[in-house]
Amino acid sequence: MKITTKEVRKVTKILNDVISEYKEEVISKKRDWRTYEQCVARRLKAAFVELKPLVKKAVQSINKVKKEKRGAKPLLTLEQKVLTLLLKHLTCKSNREMSFMLILFSWLNGIDVSYKTIERLYSDQEVLLALHNLHVLTLKKRRVEEIDCGGDGTGYGLTVKKHYATEVQKLKDKIKVAELQNVGSNKARKKRNVFVYSFAIIDLKTRMYVAYGTSLKSEKEAFISAINMLQKLEVKIQSIRLDKYFQQYYVEYIENIFGDVKFYIIPKKNATIKGSWAWKKMLAFFVSDVKVFLKEYFRRNQCESIFAEDKRKIGWKLGQKRFDRIDTANSLTALWHNLYWLID
């Protein structure tokens, strides 16, 4: 099917009306809260049953060759380090609070470490390798091999004093005012560093995090980080749904890395047909049957519900200052989510 830029823009002009009409036609299912709570309890139980065996398997393949024999012997084994970090993240405790909790547990297991030991776990290379192995094991357990996925970004606070959603809205308002007055816009933008951008690529069938990335600068940088992670995994993308921020350049970028992929991205009002073959195919589908296209695109809404679910369980702040430790904290959120969804 041949299309023109004029045809694409004609559809994007009336898109808001089409979306309103589409939403009226779609019948949303009401949630059965009793069944929902039963499913949540079952998933939680499965997560805690599978946690220790999976961590044990994740650390087994890591062999550390230590040339230097001097220095104190580690108080925690690698398995204990990974479990401690995961449990700390789940309970939303500070490094100091977690060290106090371990003192209580020491009555049973003999572990007694300082809060600095807990803090260093976030940048321990062995721990990072084990967490990556654990992520791969959760994907293999759910047989995540060929995926129809959605990608979306969110944000986490780095301090308890400022909430991401409210502060970002304030920041946007300040930038708009600054741009109108043409003063102080750079100063307003600098305040973004109190938050971290997180981008996740999620398998829509299993609701599992497949890849994720973080950035202190932009959602785009977090997206590139997530794509780099996905590239290293043995997972094939069949289709992907992204926000309209990601247009021709990103379609071509993904296509060059992963080959033949179906894209579902709502084009901007000034979109053109210039771009890769995948971009042209997507626009042809968009113009020929808008509502079917929207049905596929709106499957991406699962990403937002997953982010909300994670923030309710684990919280909206990551509580770290160094970027490498912020990145580790974000990966812990993804790991706990995948552990919760090891069963349907």
Image (cartoon, rainbow, N blue to C red):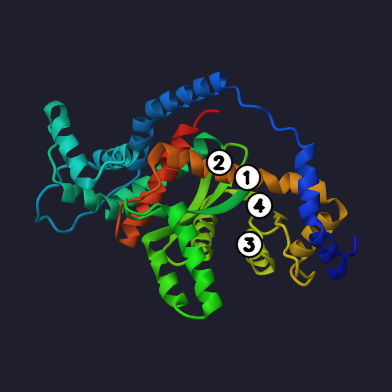
Q: Which residue is mark 4?
A: 240
Q: Earlier in the sequence, mark 4 or mark 2?
A: 4
Three-letter code for the amino acid on which mark 1 is drawn? Asn
Residue nearest the viewer, comparing 272 with 68: 272
Q: Earlier in the sequence, mark 3 or mark 1?
A: 3
Which of the numbered marks, if any, corresponds to residue 301?
1
The disc labelled 2 sits on which kind of residue? Ser
Q: CA distance from mark 1 to mark 2?
A: 7 Å
Q: Is residue 197 above or below residue 252?
A: above
Mark nearer the N terminus (4 vs 3)? 4
Q: Marks 1 and 4: which is nearer the front?
A: 1
Measured Cα–Cα span from mark 2 to mark 3: 25 Å
- Contact (Cβ within 8 Å) of mark 4 with mark 3: yes
Crowd class of label 2 (few under 14; some 14 to 19; many from 20; radius 10 Å): few
Q: Which quadrant would the C terminus be assigned to in this image?
A: top right
Q: Are marks 1 and 2 in contact (CB under 8 Å)?
A: yes
Q: Callout 3: 10 Å neighbours few (<14), some, many (20+)? A: some
Secondary structure found at label 3? helix
Tag 2 secondary structure:
helix
What label does residue 305 carry, if any?
Answer: 2
Q: Residue at x 70, y 33 (%)?
A: 28
Residue 46's mark?
none
Residue 320: give x, y in percent of width and height.
Answer: 30, 54
CA gap between label 4 and label 2 equals 17 Å
User: What residue is drawn where x is 43% and y is 71%?
Assistant: 188
Single out the mark in the foreground, 4 or 3: 4
Residue found farthest to the bottom: 182
Disc 3 marks which residue? Answer: 254
Callouts 4 and 2 close, C-beta under 8 Å: no
Q: Identify which amino acid the numbered label 4 is placed on.
A: Ile
Label 3 – label 1 distance at C-alpha: 21 Å
Taking 333 as reference, is 23 left or right?
A: right
